[in-house]
Amino acid sequence: MFDFLSDYDDPSLLGAFWVTVQLTVFSAIGSLIWGTLLAAMRVSPVPLMRGFGTAYVNIVRNIPLTVIIVFTSLGLADIFGVTMGAPDDFKLKYFRLAVLGLVAYTAAFVCEAIRSGINTVPVGQAEAARAIGLSFSQVLRLVVLPQAFRSVIGPLANVLIALTKNTTVAATIGVAEAALLMKEMIENEAQTLLIGAVFAFGFVVLTLPTGLFLGWLSKRLAVKR
Amino acid sequence: MTSVLYDAPGPKAKRRNLLFSVVFFVLLALLLWWVWQTLDDKNQLEWSLWKPFTTSEAWTTYLLPGLADTLKAAALSMVIALPLGAVLGIARMSDHRWVRIPAGAVVEFFRAIPVLLLMLFANEFYVRSTGIPSDERPLYAVVTGLVLYNASVLAEVVRAGILSLPKGQSEAAMAIGLRKSQTMTSILLPQAVTAMLPAIVSQLVVIVKDTALGGVMLGFTELLNTRSTLAANYANVIPSFIVVAVIFIVLNFILTSFASWLEGRLRRSKRSTGAVVGADKVDDVNAAEVGGTYGTGAGGTI
């Protein structure tokens, strides 16, 4: 029944899902950093940074991810000549471009999640921090963000799961991840339903434990008030 | 909240903020200058590439039909997914375990799978098992994929909408002797639908954005797809991307603003119970609060 799987070795089924995992992990790290910076900009005392953060989030959130990913290939790579440090290795180049696109897009949602987390921190916390003379960056780094992060693990887990699913969009620029392999298999093999089930199962395996673990973690780390 | 994080700037802080502003401005300007220079080098700024957008041909042949297809797929998906989602959502709250558990499984399953996989599968299914002509097939596949995914998301929205109503509503209904089905259809659902409206509108944004996937992967002639035909014709990659992105931004911005206007209006309204499922609540409607399974509850607004 699963004989046809052995006909695919570049990438194999597991290889394709491994690329999906890599896309997810690299994009998650990148978007967490960039998203936190954006959130810090959006609450900062510098009006220009606030404006930039707001504009970035509102613009990027409203563009389809597909447009962004396709643009990284046709625009950034072909017109701007961005090679992401891999001018000759096409596989690596498009992989990195896909990560760049995913980071740019996901960071907007990470930023909003963190900002909503900042709003859950009681006003007294920031007031007390200011009263003992901390500066803005100290208030944010030492008092507000640590509490905010703990309360946004739930929403961030949702963003992470959505990101896992969104990595399939990388197929539009030919990154050999799960969705692209499924497209190839489903067009060439007879067992449509079986192939669909195998790939669906793969994504359930990737997203379900993440949801369970982070859900447990968010309950455990929630700030008791 | 913002001002709570820092003191009113004194003379020193004002100087420092000004310094940050200047540094940030210079960095931004450098980036923009690099973009501008590159575009200029590659001749992407020439007026001949932008001129097509001032003529009616580019709009009537490429952009407007593309936009129409985007909107058609989005509207169809929403119209089909909404009743399906309502049925699934209500089924998931059923008193009977044999209704509740399968409905929950279906919802969690389709929410865990990328919408692209659903579209690809639907497309292949239509190729092999139905006689849908090949020029209409992409639309069918895109709508099927979007319906399956969004019905599950909307099922959770419906559930949250009904749970957001004050308990007194269903208690009062039961007290005057209504059946469970009567309570649901004449008391709870009508109020829940109003409460859900903002979340439904903001889910439309997600649907509009997801149609673009079908354009690249299935050849569905929506906006992103007609953009590539247009760019092939006028050789204006960057201008066409910018125009298409702006169309998407404006469209989705209108929908988002409408959703938050609706939300504010419903919250203020005196006639309703004041229960609202907010636009950003779609992904909070996950397990923890509503007490369902800890699943893959996710990605509502992405």
Image: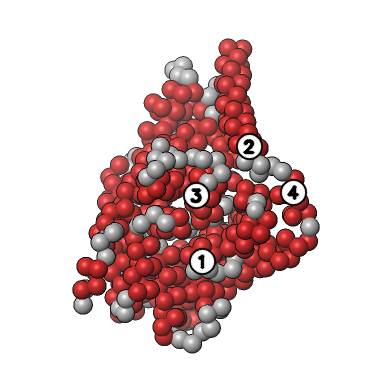
What residue occupies the far front of the structure in this picture?
Answer: A88
Looking at the rendered structure, the secondary structure element under dot 2 is helix
Query: Residue B161: horizontal and vertical position, in percent?
Result: 49, 64
Kindly report the distance in space between the C-alpha atoms of the residues bearing marks 3 and 2.
18 Å
Looking at the rendered structure, the secondary structure element under dot 3 is helix
Q: Which residue is mark 3?
A: A73
Label disc, if present, on residue B214 of the rendered structure:
1
Query: Residue B205: horizontal and vertical position, in percent?
Result: 57, 59
| 1 vs 2, front mark | 2
Q: Is residue B158 shown left or right of residue A164?
A: right
- Check disc 1 and give the amino acid type: Gly
Looking at the rendered structure, the secondary structure element under dot 4 is helix
Quadrant of residue B228 within the rendered picture: bottom right
The residue at the point 53 percent across, 24 percent down is B6
Q: Which residue is mark 4?
A: B48
Instruction: Say which label, 4 or 2, has the lower sequence index.
Output: 2
Label disc, if present, on residue B41 of the rendered structure:
2
Q: Residues within 10 Å of mark 2 (few under 14, many from 20)?
A: few
- Check disc 3 and give the amino acid type: Ser
Query: Residue A161: horizontal and vertical position, in percent?
Result: 37, 54
- Check disc 2 and give the amino acid type: Asp
The residue at the point 59 percent across, 68 percent down is B221
Label 4 marks which chain's residue?
B
Residue B82 shows in this picture? no
Asked if badge 4 and badge 1 are on a common chain, one would say yes
Instruction: Say which label, 1 or 2, has the lower sequence index.
Output: 2
Kindly report the distance in space between the C-alpha atoms of the residues bearing marks 3 and 1.
18 Å
Looking at the rendered structure, the secondary structure element under dot 1 is helix
